[in-house]
Image (spheres, rainbow, N blue to C red):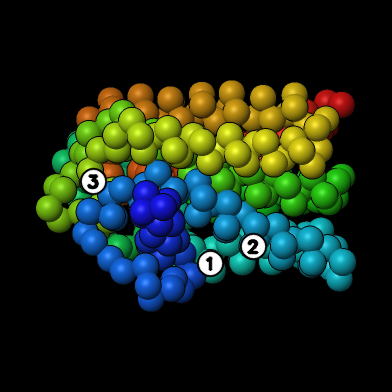
Amino acid sequence: MSALLHEIRLFFIALQFFSRCPIPSWVGFEPQWLQQCARHFPAVGLCVGAFAGLVLWAALWVWPPAVAVGLSMAASIWMTGGFHEDGWADSCDGLGGSVSRARALEIMKDSRIGSYGALGLILMLGLKASALFSLAESDPGLAVLVTLFAHAASRAAPVWLMHSLPYAGDADHAKAKPLATQANGLTLAVAFGWVAATATLLLSLQSQLLPSLLLALLVAAGLTLYMQGWLDRRLGGYTGDNLGATQQVVELGLLLSFLALLNVF
């Protein structure tokens, strides 16, 4: 029972860290929990995806798909405070040009957004909106389920990076210091377990999604490994911004994968 209670506490710590959601006062806090809670990142994504999916489903009853998708994306960004989008923009600024490793790390620490970051955000949000719009227009129920799955599964990718790569910046001065500590095998296994549970839920609701799901998981794995290799070559590791960027890339890849098979069949 104490082990289960500890995991529940870790989930709430992760939820508090990556969203605006309030958590119960009985949860408490210990500094080491911030690193341990990484195992529940996909569970936080499940909550964010459920909220965004609910907004999408409700909005589709009142407004056309374009408006419903905009409201759904706004809801997810509001819930997370744009945490991952900020990491994507900073990573685009730092790694978009041909600057040295030291200069790239310096740029990513700057709170101001540059041209690469602005262009990256426009393209990322535009592509996600386009993919969700096409899904919602073709099959509203599928769009809701894919929103749920994409948010959950994409958050396992940063956990993989935390397990596979060292931290590239100054860990003592990291903006998100808990993310500067390497994730162990148990953390990775639990994170993947959340993805498997979400995939099982998806198939229980629509079993015909198995081919799309398999393709999406392959694409997600490929994009995660690509980001790992690129960050290793470019920085020799990852930063907190790079984790957010990877989540965004994998989320977009998942959306596009489901849409690709929907268009083919």
Asked if residue 260 can be seen in this view, the reply is no
Tell me the SS state at disc 1. helix
Q: Are marks 2 and 1 in contact (CB under 8 Å)?
A: yes
Q: Mark 2 highlights which residue? A: 51
Q: Mark 3 highlights which residue? A: 180
Measuring 79% from the left and 42% from the top, which residue is drawn there?
A: 205
Give whichever of discs 3 and 1 has the lower sequence position. 1
Q: Is residue 78 above or below residue 211?
A: below
Question: Of the numbered discs in the image, which one, if any, rests on residue 154?
Answer: none
Give whichever of discs 2 and 3 has the lower sequence position. 2
Residue 196 in picture, x, y percent from top left: 58, 34
- Amino acid type at image mark 2: Phe
Q: Are marks 3 and 1 in contact (CB under 8 Å)?
A: no
Give whichever of discs 2 and 1 has the lower sequence position. 2
- Amino acid type at image mark 3: Ala
Tell me the SS state at disc 2. helix
Distance from the alpha carbon under mark 3 to that under mark 1: 23 Å
Distance from the alpha carbon under mark 2 to that under mark 1: 8 Å
Residue 103 in picture, x, y percent from top left: 19, 44
Q: Nearer the viewer, residue 108 or 16?
A: 16
Q: Residues within 10 Å of mark 2 (few under 14, many from 20)?
A: some
Residue 156 in picture, x, y percent from top left: 47, 39
Q: Quadrant of residue 212?
A: top right
- Amino acid type at image mark 1: Met
Measuring 74% from the left and 51% from the top, which residue is drawn there?
A: 144
Measuring 61% from the left and 66% from the top, which residue is drawn there?
A: 75
Question: Of the numbered discs in the image, which one, if any, rests on residue 79?
Answer: 1
